[in-house]
Image (cartoon, grey):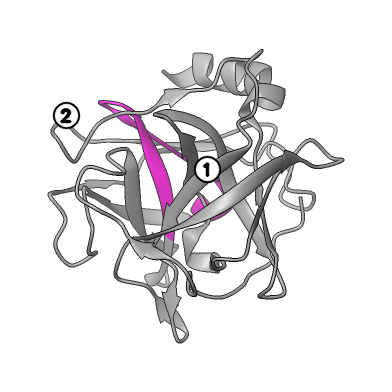
Amino acid sequence: YIISYNEIIVGKSTLAEAGQNPSLVHLRIAIGSTGLLQTCAGSLINSRWILTTASCLNNVRFIWIRYGALEVISPELVTESSTVRINPNYNAQTGENNLALISINRNVESSDNIAPVSLADADGDLPEAANFCAYGQEGEAPGERLSCINVDLSVGEDGSIVADSEDGEASRFDIGAPLIVDGVQYGILVSSEGDGAGSEYLFIVFYNLFKTYSIFKSLYI
């Protein structure tokens, strides 16, 4: 997996509605001793854990997690954490096994706008299409409003899920965002490539990497 970056979700994107993405979380991450901030996304997989990418959490010092946030400035809930679990098999050079968990410092109660997501079965089939939601970017800054685009799905030669769309593109601030269809998460955004006319989003494929994820999960959850 080669990590590259692109533009804001634009074009034919639509603003997300309340309750449409109850497991999606916005991550603001303080890096190392510098305190510099970066933005990623993740998914609530149970009341105490967030699933995201290992590449988002390199040299992390502190994380603010926003839940139920149609707008970043007005989330339904905010928690804080400094406890992460990086996949021990993660390879930063190749992007292999790009998975990580964030431990939440309290039990998160479900509501209409906050709820954990189910993960795809190891032998499940990949849907043909999805509605992918993320915050994108505004200029060179992270986006502040949750928007969604329609994407067509296929499996790439390396096993990644490739999502093609003419509706818009993701951004570097959306890394870790979940690919969810009918309440089931099939992948995580790890990179974005596109020419504006037919963008490609690469996701970790859960049904191909599910054994790896299950072993990783069993170490910590």
Mark 2 / mark 1, whichever is N-terminal: 2
Q: Amino acid at mark 2?
A: Ser
Looking at the rendering, the stretch of residues picked out in magenta corresponds to 40-59
According to the image, label 2 marks what residue?
110
Q: What residue appears at the point 48 percent right and 60 percent down from the top-left corner?
A: 174
According to the image, label 1 marks what residue?
130
Q: CA distance from mark 2 to mark 1?
A: 24 Å
Q: What residue appears at the point 60 percent right and 33 percent down from the top-left corner?
A: 87
Horizontal side of 213 relative to 80 (left or right) equals: right
Count how many numbered circles sit on residues in the image.
2
Percent x, y for residue 148? 41, 57
Percent x, y for residue 60? 45, 55
For this orientation, the residue located farthest to the bottom is 139
Percent x, y for residue 166? 61, 65
Q: Is residue 56 above or below residue 158?
A: below
Q: Quadrant of the C terminus?
A: top left
